[in-house]
Image (tube, grey):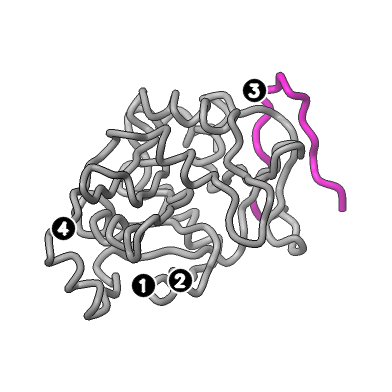
Amino acid sequence: MPIPFLAADDETTPFPPVNTALEEPNGLLMAGGNLSKRRLMAAYCSGVFPWFEEGEPILWWSPNPRCVIFPDQIKISRSLKKTINSQRYEITQNLAYREVMKHCGAPRKGSNGTWVTDEMIDAYCELNKQGVAQSLEVWLDHRLVGGLYGIELGRVFVGESMFSKERDASKIALVHLCQSNKYDLIDCQLETNHLVSMGATTIDRDTYIMMLGKLGETPMSSQYFKQA
């Protein structure tokens, strides 16, 4: 079954119901459109996120099941706890948002491409200026060595990506996020062994959408939830 394909200037056509997303590839819902604030907010409030490589059309996803972390269930290994307690690392918020995204977009081992494109960086930096997109930075000796970024919707944090230049630096950021008492749900989107080792689990898409509706609405996002 083909998926809808939007024109690049289309900001108003709503997303299809997420239960119409493909089973293979898991969660592919729609293609095209753009990365305007309106489109991105409508996506996240609908349980949808963009994920595509440079040179591809924008692809929109809502996978089933959904990988999440409940903050009070975060797993901290003995060695990680020792690293955190050493207090060698400084953690800041939104101090270097663009730099965090650029590090997250650097090609990984075994891959030449990136899905954190310049277009995406510019779009999310605009959301950061408006208080919707958030980053955590981990510093060692005044060097940015780790961090993460994502979208804040009320008590839900939708994690987009994280990076490490030093061992455990991204884990330190994730633990700090979970222990901030700001969120009841961390959306990790896709399951990885790394996330599972830190306490991530999966919930079905319907449960995720229900929790997003209960926990994610804010004065800024309410108009987009009504459209979702």
Give the mark nearest the N terminus, 3 or 2: 3
Say which residue appears at 73% left-offset and 42% top-offset: 30
Q: Distance between the residues labelled 3 and 2?
A: 35 Å
Q: Foreground mark, 1 or 3?
A: 1
The residue that mark 2 highlights is 194
As drawn, is 135 to the left or to the right of 206? left
**Which picture quadrant has residue 166?**
bottom left
Give the mark nearest the N terminus, 1 or 3: 3
Magenta stretch: includes residue 81: no
- Residue 67 in the image: state x and y as whole percent: 49, 65
The residue that mark 3 highlights is 11
Q: Foreground mark, 3 or 2?
A: 2
The residue that mark 4 highlights is 88
Q: How crowded is mark 4: few (under 14 residues within 10 Å), some or many (20 or more)?
A: few
- Residue 29 in the image: state x and y as whole percent: 71, 48
Disc 1 marks a residue whose amino acid type is Met
- Residue 16 in the image: state x and y as whole percent: 69, 42
* 38 in relation to 170, above or below: above
Q: How far apart are marks 4 and 2 (CA)?
A: 23 Å
The dot on residue 198 is 1
Q: Distance between the residues labelled 1 and 3?
A: 37 Å
Discs 1, 3 touching: Cβ within 8 Å? no
Read off the magenta span: 1-19
* 38 in relation to 216, above or below: above
| Quadrant (top left/top right/bottom left/bottom right) for the C terminus | top right
Q: Residues within 10 Å of mark 1 (few under 14, many from 20)?
A: some
